[in-house]
Image: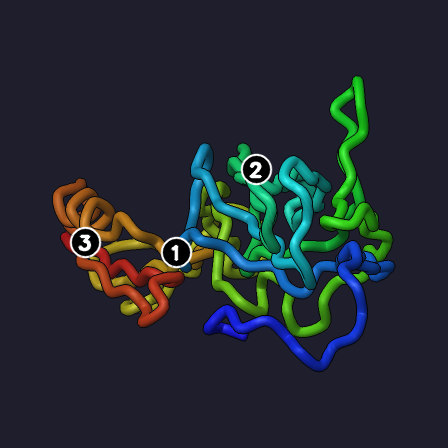
Amino acid sequence: DIALNASTTDGKANAAVTYSDVTAPKVTSFTSTSADGTYGKSSGVNITANLSEAVQSGSQFQVTLGTTDVVVLTAGSSGTTLSGTYVVGSGDSSNDLSITSFSTNYNDGSSTNYVTDLFGNKMTSTSLPVGQNLNNNENIVIDTLPVFAVDSNSGVAGDNPTLGQNDGNTQADAGDTLLFQFTEAVSNRSTVDTAISSGDAKGTTSWSSDYKSLTVTLGA
């Protein structure tokens, strides 16, 4: 017992202790130690896989992200987590980063490393954990795409604003409005406002609440 008293009722002689485990480890959730938020080009985002049991140090496998990028996750020590870093590339985009698939191992070109528990059982399941994907547990947005003006008439990328007439003619002149719509919220609004107010048209600006639309009222 915990006071170091020997058992007097167990008649079994000293024997070797044996263990038996035939259950393979499996992924129970995907998380991240990176903060929720928006990440741009060259940013690093942690990807962590949590497993059902401890695995051996050096265990590795690959995950494919919703951006189609592939990240290798590694167990830095014996334990229930493997992690890796996703470096955001040019053109990557995701409203809520998720894992779309994963393998059970990683081949570095010279050898294959598996996800193996402490008793030698290798991971075999590649089923995504229901309700425990990365996008279920985190809110990570990937945005490397520039803001585009959208043609107000066709809805496709372009730079044709909608002209609002104040005087009934067909010319864009003082008092008329130009409506610009964008593919996403504009962040450098003060720069845009300054450029318009100090330009030849001496216009005034009004932004929509989501900052995706800009109405310019033309000055003299």
How crowded is the residue under tag 2: few (<14 C-alpha within 10 Å), some, or many (20+)? few
Question: Which numbered disc, 2 or 3, marks the residue closer to the eye?
Answer: 2
Name which of mark 2 and mark 1 comes first in the sequence. Answer: 1
Q: Helix, strand or loop at disc 1?
A: loop
Q: Quadrant of the N terminus?
A: bottom right
Name which of mark 2 and mark 3 comes first in the sequence. Answer: 2
* Count of number-bearing discs: 3
**Which residue is the site of mark 1?**
35
- Pointers 3 and 1 in contact (C-beta within 8 Å): no
User: Which quadrant of the structure image shows residue 19?
Assistant: bottom right
Q: Does 44 appear above or below 17?
A: above
Tell me how far mark 2 sits from mark 1, CA to CA: 21 Å
**Which residue is the site of mark 3?**
203
Q: Does 215 appear above or below 108?
A: below
How crowded is the residue under tag 1: few (<14 C-alpha within 10 Å), some, or many (20+)? few
Q: Residue furthest bottom?
A: 9
**Which residue is the site of mark 2?**
91
Tell me how far mark 3 sits from mark 1, CA to CA: 40 Å
Residue 88: numbered disc? none
- In the image, residue 154 lies at what x, y percent? 60, 58
